[in-house]
């Protein structure tokens, strides 16, 4: 049987270039080798997104983005977390096998506490139970579908380790291997994509290149990439330049060599470097952008895609949860 890969996508903002190259593109490649499960983790987003209008919009945006970049809902299982209530029942069951100490040690939670301490606030200021228990729900996402491989960013590895530990405790307790033990998959070839200012591209830093801007605003955004004060005549070191670092990610080897030559030869101003990058990016985004806009104009279609995914996901989740209920003695 084909191994199963599963990944969750948190709808918390408009998708940007870092999301595409760091998450969307590698996730979609998995469908070639694995039985692929993709889901919109809307109940994970609820830990921080607290207006209905915003959450609804981000779910639509991110659903359309994955489809626009080629997610095939026929060949994979693509669903919204909140459409599969079995996940939340499993989350409670797993929480009864989760040592509270795991959650105290979770990096994401500890980061919040550290920030509070730095601001001289109460340790748990603004930390809701959803944030604290986040890794349990994530374990339920993964274990419900017996995922073998979970592609994630490096910051999520600890969560997969929790899922493994919780699964082991449960299996040992009931003397059955109910749950597969998931493996994190961190793609080393996907580096951290830098933003306009050279820091990690992130919506928290307002340094992103949003994926679906129209051409003019896209070009404007690219013109904001920070460069040094070299004159056009001076030869430039491509490896020491934010524009090239981003441009490079979109090029094959031969194309990259050609662009490097232009930098090294001198006579190229930063305006021209940015224009070259814009043209490459715009070429690659043109078709997805048109598809994205088409999809957003047709919310009925997005709903239908997610409904189809829900049915496929529940066809797996409902009988599996029945087995678990019977094992723990609530049926
Ligand atoms: P943001 O930092 O903008 O809030 P998210 O945390 O919502 O982005 O990230 C969603 C996904 O995109 C995650 O899988 C994350 O690893 C990936 N991602 C986000 N920013 C980058 C980046 N700059 N480089 C590589 N991957 C990224
Ligand atoms: N926690 C992940 C993130 O912040 C999103 C996520 C939720 C996820 N459930 C998951 C990822 C299950 C992989 C598997 O990006």
Image (spheres, rainbow, N blue to C red):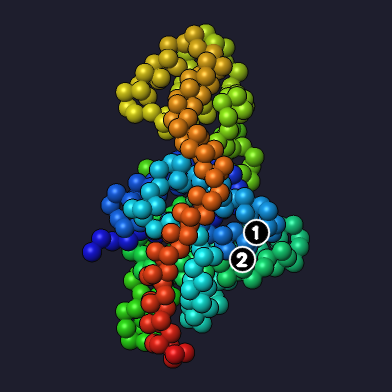
Q: Which mark, by number, is residue 48?
A: 1
Q: Position of residue 103 (x, y in %)?
A: 55, 71
Pick whichever, 127 or 145, lies toward us: 145
- Residue 19 visible to the viewer: no
Where on the picture, by quarter, is residue 147?
bottom left
Q: Residue at 33% across / 71% down in the picture?
A: 180
Q: Is residue 247 placed above or below 154 in the rendered structure?
A: above
Answer with mark 1 or mark 2, whichever residue precedes in sequence: 1
- Left or right placement of residue 245 versus residue 175 in this view: right
Work out whether 69 lies above or below 126.
Answer: above
SS at mark 2?
helix
Q: What's the residue at 61%, 37% (across, down)? A: 207
- Nearer to me, 313 or 89: 313
x%, y% of residue 190? Answer: 41, 43
Is residue 316 shown left or right of residue 126?
left
Task: Identify the image quadrant of the N terminus.
Answer: bottom left
Give the number of the disc on residue 106: none
Using the numbered discs, state the Cα–Cα distance from disc 1 to disc 2 in whole angstroms.
8 Å
Residue located 71% across and 64% down the image: 126
Per the rendering, the mark at residue 131 is 2
Helix, strand or loop for disc 1:
loop
Tell me, yes or no, whether the two marked residues, 1 and 2, touch with CB atoms within 8 Å.
Answer: yes
**Mark 1, other Cα within 10 Å: few <14 / some 14–19 / many ≥20:** some
* Residue at x 36%, y 53% (from the top left corner): 74
Quarter of the image that includes the C terminus: bottom left
Q: Is residue 76 above or below residue 141?
A: above
């Amino acid at each position: 049987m084909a191994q199963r890969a599963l990944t969750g996508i948190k709808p918390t903002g408009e998708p940007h270039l870092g999301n595409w190259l760091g998450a969307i593109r590698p996730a979609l490649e998995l469908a070639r080798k694995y039985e692929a499960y993709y889901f919109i983790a809307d109940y994970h987003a609820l830990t921080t997104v607290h207006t209905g209008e915003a959450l609804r919009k981000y779910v639509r945006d991110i659903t359309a983005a994955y489809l626009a970049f080629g997610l095939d809902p026929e060949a994979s299982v693509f669903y919204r977390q909140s459409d599969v209530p079995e996940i939340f029942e499993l989350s409670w069951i797993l929480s009864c096998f989760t040592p509270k100490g795991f959650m105290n040690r979770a990096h994401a939670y500890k980061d919040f506490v550290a920030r509070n301490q730095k601001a001289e606030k109460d340790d748990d200021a603004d930390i809701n139970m959803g944030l604290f228990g986040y890794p349990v729900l994530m374990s339920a996402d993964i274990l419900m579908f017996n995922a073998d491989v979970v592609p994630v960013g490096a910051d999520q590895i600890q969560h997969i380790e929790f899922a493994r530990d919780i699964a082991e405790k449960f299996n040992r307790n009931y003397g059955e291997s109910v749950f597969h033990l998931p493996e994190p998959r961190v793609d080393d070839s996907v580096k951290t994509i830098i933003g306009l200012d050279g820091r990690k591209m992130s919506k928290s830093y307002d340094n992103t290149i949003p994926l679906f801007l129209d051409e003019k605003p896209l070009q404007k955004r690219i013109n904001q990439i920070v460069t040094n004060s070299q004159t056009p005549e001076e030869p430039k070191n491509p490896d020491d330049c934010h524009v090239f670092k981003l441009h490079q990610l979109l090029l094959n080897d031969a194309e990259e060599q050609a662009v490097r030559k232009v930098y090294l030869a001198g006579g190229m101003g930063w305006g021209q470097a940015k224009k070259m990058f814009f043209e490459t990016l715009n070429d690659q985004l043109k078709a997805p952008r048109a598809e994205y806009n088409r999809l957003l104009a047709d919310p009925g279609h997005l709903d239908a895609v997610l409904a189809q995914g829900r049915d496929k996901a529940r066809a797996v989740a409902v009988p599996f949860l029945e087995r678990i209920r019977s094992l723990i003695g609530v049926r």
